[in-house]
Image (spheres, coloured by chain):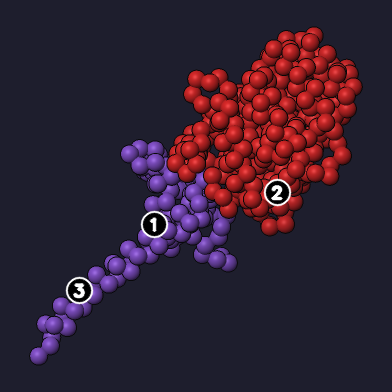
Amino acid sequence: MDELRIHPSFEQKVAVPFTAEGVEIFQINLGYRCNLECRHCHVEAGPKRPELMSRPVMEMCLQVLQRHPIPTIDITGGTPEMHPDFPWFLEECAALGRRMLVRTNGVILLESEYAAFLDLYARHRVEVVVSFPHVDLKMTNRQRGEGVYSRLIEAVRMLNERGYGQPDSGLVLNLVHNPSGAYLPGLQNNLENHYRQALKEKHGLVFNQLFCITNMPIGRYLTYLQRTDNYEDYMMALVNAFNPATLESVMCKSTLSVGWDGKLYDCDFNQMLGMTVNHGAPEHIMMFDLAKLGTRRVVTGNHCYAGSSCRGEIA
Amino acid sequence: MADYYEQKDLADFAHIGEYAPELGKKYFDYYGEAMKDGALSAREKALIALAVATTQHCPYCIDAYTNHCLSLGVSQEEMMEAVHVGSAMVAGIVLAHSTQMRKIIKNKEM
């Protein structure tokens, strides 16, 4: 990111550096493998990405979770299902009895090789978070690839059939919206109402909550912004949308993100930028120290403008 | 001044209260109330605003409300239909005024 053109910088804007307030969410990125190559993807995931979390790093994650009562395990990727050791890892995590959520691209669950995850998720009462950029077919396909919208509808239908998103089932299905272009998402409750109505009327589908994510100006999305001459306007929109009230609830205050190689980050976006935790906190899972990590000063940059404008409603 | 309209001037809208802050505040309070969810949703209001923006040829408003509609998940088809409603209204308003012309013609005819 071109730091010089952003004024004021995020650090200047927030004035006081912010610090973590414990580790409530242990986010694990299993690697960058995915069967889609979405245009907004900040980790630039795809079928040919070789980065996958090794078994020893997975075991270190489990040891940390066994030693510390961190309440939420949040598994992401890529799409986690494509990690060959994920079924084992999921069982191990489930045995810990914590709240567990998996962020999936959804459509992978239609592939015969991965269809078993539908029942596995339901059996372990995993909260499923599906990337669902738009209720408009064209917009979704432009962003995620031809034919993805109809496959996504089918995947949500299969989750609904297992009880996901249904009232009183206790099986949580949350969707994630992110803009299909160089603009910011609207208010979460407006979009959630629109999604709920559209998915119900058009497809008879249900879900629990919609999370709106502001696209981070990094990775593939940054390339898109620069190529289409939208970068400066987008950054200005982010700076103008800055809302100090959201700083209380940004996810880095309660989340620790473990990269596929075991490095520790304040969030998945810092991971993509290679900005490990700093300011005296250990930067690798093998040196995990809850006291230090739970009170660490968060590493920030101008991309954090996108974190605050999404009102911290990521999870 | 190179151009009467510059894109970056849209950001100046927040400062229209300059030189008359009380009136500016009253305007923004009113604007905020009128645009929020009510009997009509914020989405429906955004489409009305977009139609007005195009019929009134306001480049600032077109910029602001196109982005706002995108943010609210409004589809391209919905936006274009809203513009056609505005367009049809303007055409109808023009044609309705031909009544005056036709009345005068009829009055002047021998």
User: Which residue position is annotated with label 2?
Assistant: A39
Mark positioned earlier in the residue sequence (1 or 3): 1
Q: Residue at x 75, y 36 (%)?
A: A113
Marks 2, 3 in one chain: no
Q: Is residue A45 above or below residue A63?
A: below
How many other residues sit within 10 Å of disc 2, few (<14), some (14-19) or many (≥20)? many
Say whether marks 2 and 3 touch (CB < 8 Å): no
CA–CA distance in space, label 2 to label 3: 54 Å
Q: Which quarter of the picture shows residue A21?
A: top right
How many other residues sit within 10 Å of disc 1, few (<14), some (14-19) or many (≥20)? many
CA–CA distance in space, label 1 to label 2: 33 Å
Of all chains, the one bearing label 2 is A
Circle 1 sits in a helix, a strand or a loop, which is it? helix
Q: Position of residue B11 (x, y in %)?
A: 54, 49
Marks 1, 3 in one chain: yes
Amino acid type shown at disc 2: Arg
Q: Residue furthest front?
A: A112
Say whether marks 1 and 2 touch (CB < 8 Å): no
Residue A84 in view (yes/no): yes
Q: Colour of chain B?
A: purple
Q: Quadrant of the C terminus of chain A?
A: top right
